[in-house]
Image (cartoon, rainbow, N blue to C red):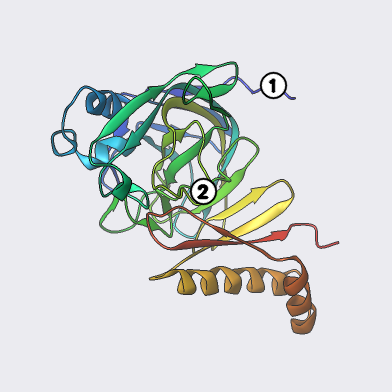
Amino acid sequence: MSSIPTPSLVLAKELHTLDFRAGHPAVATVASGTVARFETGDIAYERLSKGESIEAIGLESFNRVTGPVAVEGAQPGDAIRVTILGIEIHRSWSVWLPGFGELGGKTQEIIARQIPLEGGRAVISKRISVPIEPMIGCIGTAPADGVGSTFSPAYHWGGNMDLREMSPGTAVDLPVEVPGGNLSIGDHHAAMGQGEPTWVSLESAGASTVRIELIRGAGISHPIVRREGKVCFVGQGADLATAHQHAVDRAWDWLLAQGLEPFEAYAYASARMEMRLGGPASPQVLACLPEDLS
């Protein structure tokens, strides 16, 4: 396993915001190719575990993001590529809230329990543990207009996408809508099922080390994720069927851009396209194809 480069920029968890917006001043401006470390905390989960109410803590506080970071020369129409080089998990929690998520009806009380981390595993109880498989839940650039939540929905420029694919070894391209792009990262997870089925992961304090690159003239409308030889197009919509169609349409356009004739693209998609669920913040579907069509 290759070593993680030493970051030239370290962003402490105190450099956080609770939303995405163009008006947030950048905490740093970096050149394309910079390696940076984004640190995040877990104070909201600690407060919840001590009996404070969600209302007192504030829902967005659970998904604080660190940043934003501007990229020199980034302009609308470009993309920022974030390559995840490594993720550290420092402390982790499991939270069960009445009425929240698909299993929220199975409890009548709030349970916020710290999950010990030992030997590369998250210890749920004396008899069961799971591998630590760290990932980033919330990552995005700033919208041209308005304010984007770190909680819900997910947006075409990122946000709380909760994509299981956002782990070390992944590169994600995010659209730039404002000068500098203003990239923020937060919501680390020690482990999460595909599609975040309970709407909650093993929520964690941690740190991501990433490489930030400027892709000029990318002209993308929504995130593109690359991992393990596959390119995945994020589709979004008012419902899952619409998001599914959007993802397939984006993948289709990419196949045609690779020089395939329409029937070739259709037959190849039939044989090789893989559909995956994104997180539950809003309807999201990924259409994944081998980046090398052979």
> In the picture provided, is 70 more to the left or to the right than 249?
left
Dot 2 crowding, Cα within 10 Å, few <14, some 14–19, many 20+: many
Residue type indicated by callout 2? Leu
Residue at coordinates 59% horizontally, 19% vertically from top-left? 6
Residue 79 in view here: yes
Asked whether 185 or 128 is in front, the reply is: 128
Asked whether 176 or 225 is in front, the reply is: 225
Does dot 2 land on a helix, a strand or a loop? loop
Residue at coordinates 86% horizontally, 61% vertically from top-left? 294
Does dot 1 land on a helix, a strand or a loop? loop
Q: Position of residue 174 (x, y in %)?
A: 50, 52
Classify the position of the N terminus by image quarter.
top right
Disc marking residue 163: 2
- Mark 2 or mark 1, earlier in chain: 1
Q: Which residue is mark 1?
A: 3
Task: Tell whether label 1 touches label 2 (CB within 8 Å).
Answer: no
Residue type indicated by callout 1? Ser
Instruction: Identify the residue at the far top of this view.
Output: 118
> In the picture provided, is 242 more to the left or to the right than 64?
right
Tell me: residue 282, above or below residue 4: below
Q: Position of residue 289 (x, y in %)?
A: 70, 61
Q: Position of residue 149 (x, y in %)?
A: 29, 50
Asked whether 174 or 287 is in front, the reply is: 287
Q: Position of residue 19 (x, y in %)?
A: 28, 44
Tell me: residue 20, above or below residue 7: below
Spatial CA span between label 2 and label 1: 24 Å
